[in-house]
Amino acid sequence: MYLDKTQVMVYFCLYGDEFPIDYVTETLETEPTKTYKKGEVIVRPHNPNVISTKTLYRKETAWELSTVYQESYDVKEQMDQILGPLKNKAAILNQVKAKYKLECKIFIVIIWKMEIHRFCILITNRLNLQIVLKLKLILICMQTLMKMNMTTKKAQTFFN
């Protein structure tokens, strides 16, 4: 499939060894788009090019909130869809993280014509205004690169 337009997906993942997913959902008052528990079998779609007889199991429990792929030249739109529901819940997130020893990540996936660029930001402390501002700065840089139509090699030079 050839993509003429840039598509973007953003997702927030709260993950750790084991924790009660229902408790997190109720506490955050937000329905996740995906969840899984440590030890569950990873169901993979059939692929005739891959021969595997080994059963794989989830190594962690996760609670995810994500967008779908959307045509966009402004990643901020997708970030707002994810950060909006979590914006005033930093204290709750930090309590849940501390109680169950969890980590969280925000993934930004950009499909730019036929190339896939994945930017992962690991948030280790608090989801607060300072981190959101840093994310917005990174997004502005990414938007600039997209407008400049830079290749991956040029983008690496840009960030170094």
Image (cartoon, grey):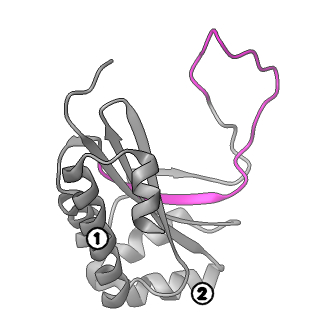
> Could you tell whether 62 is left or right of 50 in the image?
left
Q: Residue at x 27, y 79 (%)?
A: 87
Q: Residues within 10 Å of mark 2 (few under 14, many from 20)?
A: few
State how far apart marks 2 and 1 are (Cα): 20 Å
Tag 2's secondary structure?
helix
Q: Residue furthest right?
A: 54
Type of residue at label 1?
Leu
* Vertical order, 134 against 82 (above or below): below
According to the picture, the residue beneath numbered tag 1 turns out to be 83
Q: Residue furthest top?
A: 48
Q: Residue at x 56, y 59 (%)?
A: 62
Q: Position of residue 29 (x, y in %)?
A: 32, 71
Foreground: disc 2 or disc 1: 1
According to the picture, the residue beneath numbered tag 2 turns out to be 98
| Viewer-side residue, 24 vs 69 | 69
Q: Residue at x 19, y 52 (%)?
A: 147
* Vertical order, 151 against 81 (above or below): above
Query: Residue 133 colored magenta?
Result: no
Q: Position of residue 64 (x, y in %)?
A: 45, 57
* Vertical order, 28 against 75 (above or below): below
Q: Which mark is residue 37?
A: none
Q: Residues within 10 Å of mark 1 (few under 14, many from 20)?
A: many
Tag 1's secondary structure?
helix
Residue 155, quarter of the rendered image: bottom left
> Could you tell whether 106 is left or right of 82 in the image?
right
Type of residue at label 2?
Ala
Q: Which residues make up the magenta segment?
A: 44-67
Q: Position of residue 52 (x, y in %)?
A: 77, 20
Q: Position of residue 129 (x, y in %)?
A: 30, 88
Query: Residue 56 colored magenta?
Result: yes
- Magenta stretch: dominant secondary structure: loop
Count the marks: how many?
Answer: 2
